[in-house]
């Protein structure tokens, strides 16, 4: 359009080159207008194509969003008495089920089929969790008993309890260490009133040394013989 304006100014000022008539200038202007019109038509067609392609895409996105929202809002429920998850070789790796007596259990197994983690809630409602070794033996157990007592136990490879930690419903706490024969050798307790105690047992599991700190702060030491008789007491 700038060239058309310059040509008009040249005509008005008489600065048209020699041999160029007004009709020729008008013809050139018409040709340039036709070229501009063709370009505008091409741009309009391209814009129409982009819009036509963009609108369906937007509609698809909107429809997918609505579908996903509906899927989230609708509850999906799977009802079964037992569920097993297998690996690529068909071995059961996860088992979840409810027994006939109402106990609920979840077990996680290794590639050899041995239970490594077990969670259970028996009919009495006392939950428990166990961790097993490579042989499938439970080595760590954590449970809450029906009366509310909390217990953590550690077991050796022969399935003998070696360490026990517990808290009673009344508030007493205790730690017990057992030997390979299952006899308590060291016991550490704190009574509900806060009185601490420490005892050492012999090979028969009898307490031979007792140490306590009374509420007033006084320490008490008691030594006993194999029959349980006091040999020494201080103070």
Image (cartoon, helix red, strand yellow):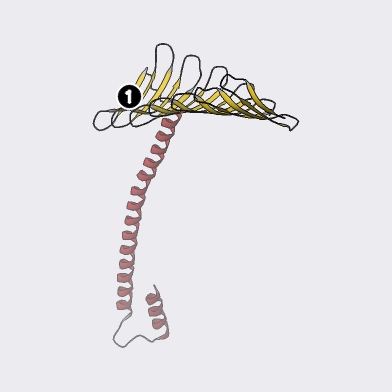
The quarter in which the N terminus is drawn is: bottom left
Q: Is residue 117 shown left or right of residue 146?
A: left
Residue found at the very far left of the displayed protein: 89
Give the x, y percent position of residue 193.
Answer: 70, 26
Q: Is residue 122 shown left or right of residue 190?
A: left
Residue occupying the point 38% across, 38% down: 64
Give the x, y percent position of residue 38.
Answer: 30, 63
The quarter in which the C terminus is drawn is: top right
Give the x, y percent position of residue 220.
Answer: 69, 30
Judged from the image, the secondary structure of the residue bearing numbered disc 1 is strand
Residue found at the very far right of the displayed protein: 216
Q: Nearer the viewer, residue 112 or 36?
A: 112
Residue occupying the point 37% across, 77% down: 3
Examine the image and state in which quarter residue 69 appears.
top left
Examine the image and state in which quarter residue 56 appears.
top left
Give the x, y percent position of residue 145.
Answer: 53, 19
Count the marks. 1
Q: Nearer the viewer, residue 128 or 213?
A: 213
Q: Is residue 45 shown left or right of residue 6?
A: left
Residue found at the very far bottom of the displayed protein: 18
Residue occupying the point 31% across, 66% down: 34
Q: Nearer the viewer, residue 210 or 197?
A: 210
Q: Nearer the viewer, residue 103 or 221?
A: 221
Mark 1 nearby-residue class (10 Å; few <14, some 14–19, many ≥20): few
Examine the image and state in which quarter residue 206 appears.
top right
Residue 96 higher or lower than 89, as above or below: above
Q: Which residue is mark 1?
A: 84
């Amino acid at each position: 359009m700038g060239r058309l304006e310059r040509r008009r100014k040249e005509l008005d000022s008489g600065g048209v080159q020699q041999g160029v008539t007004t009709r020729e200038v008008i013809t050139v202007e018409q040709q340039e207008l036709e070229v501009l019109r063709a370009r505008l038509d091409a741009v309009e067609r391209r814009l129409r194509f982009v819009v036509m392609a963009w609108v369906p895409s937007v509609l698809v996105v909107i429809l997918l969003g609505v579908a996903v929202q509906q899927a989230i809002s609708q509850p999906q429920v799977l009802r079964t008495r037992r569920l097993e998850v297998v690996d690529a070789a068909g071995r059961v790796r996860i088992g979840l089920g409810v027994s006939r007596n109402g106990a609920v259990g979840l077990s996680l197994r290794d590639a050899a089929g041995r239970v490594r983690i077990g969670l259970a809630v028996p009919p009495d409602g006392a939950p428990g969790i166990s961790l097993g070794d490579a042989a499938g033996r439970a080595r760590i157990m954590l449970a809450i008993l029906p009366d509310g007592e909390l217990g953590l136990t550690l077991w050796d490879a022969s399935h003998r309890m070696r360490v026990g930690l517990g808290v009673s419903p009344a508030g007493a706490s205790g730690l017990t260490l057992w030997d390979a024969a299952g006899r308590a050798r060291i016991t550490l307790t704190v009574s509900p009133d806060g009185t601490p105690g420490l005892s050492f047992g012999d090979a028969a599991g009898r307490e031979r040394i007792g140490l306590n700190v009374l509420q007033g702060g006084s320490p008490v030491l008691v030594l006993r013989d194999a029959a349980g008789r006091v040999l020494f007491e201080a103070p």
